[in-house]
Amino acid sequence: MNAILQKLSGANRTSLGRTNEVVAEILSSPSKFPALCDGLSSNDPVIRMRAADAIEKITVMRPELLAPYKRKLLALAVREAQIEVRWHLALMLPRLALTPRERAAAIDILFDYLRDRSSIVKTHAMQGLANLALKHPTLKAQIVPVVAELTEIGTAAMRARGRKLLPLLNRPSTTA
């Protein structure tokens, strides 16, 4: 096991362990990012969860680091069953530079996540769909009604997220 993943091991899924330390390390040395991405394939659910968390946090600031992993992330998002990984993938997918076909696949994945048993996965799927619509305003017609409906009928977390997302989604699109 590589040194990065070693820092993510141990304890259980109720703790982030040394994830924030790994985030800081990768941000200061992005060449270590591939070692972190290896954690998404780990047999250890704790490492998978913490790797997904660290990748998601890192790519808020450095989304370009995801580019070499686009196909892997799309494939993983389809087959991943672990809730903690799914909720991070829902936030990462919109950060990818997607072709129209890949974007359609990502939307299908996120719509599937809206049926997850986890409220967090569903809430993050809403956020992911909104992020895609904000990046690609032509998607608003498809996504805004879904977010609006979930804001009315979803879990408390989904309703709260929807109240934040709808004003952003309903802003007129501006062109540069």
Image (cartoon, rainbow, N blue to C red):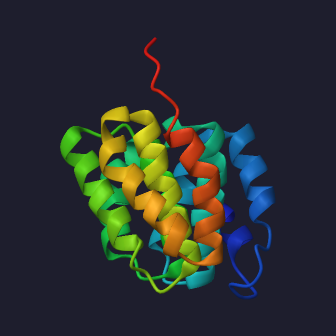
Query: In this rendering, would 1 be left or right of 145?
Result: right
Q: Which residue is more in the foreground, 80 or 100?
A: 100
Query: In this rendering, would 7 be left or right of 67?
Result: right
- The quadrant holding residue 13 is bottom right
What's the residue at 56%, 83% (across, down)?
A: 45
What's the residue at 60%, 37% (across, down)?
A: 62
Q: Which residue is more in the foreground, 91 or 140?
A: 140
Q: Which residue is more in the foreground, 60 or 67?
A: 60
Q: State whether residue 91 is above or below residue 141.
A: below
User: Residue 98, percent across and down?
Assistant: 31, 40
User: Residue 148, percent across and down?
Assistant: 47, 58
What's the residue at 79%, 59% (across, down)?
A: 20
User: Residue 27, percent across and down?
Assistant: 71, 41
Q: Which residue is more in the foreground, 35 or 55?
A: 55
- The quadrant holding residue 78 is bottom left
What's the residue at 34%, 66% (across, down)?
A: 111
Q: State whether residue 86 is above or below residue 82.
A: above
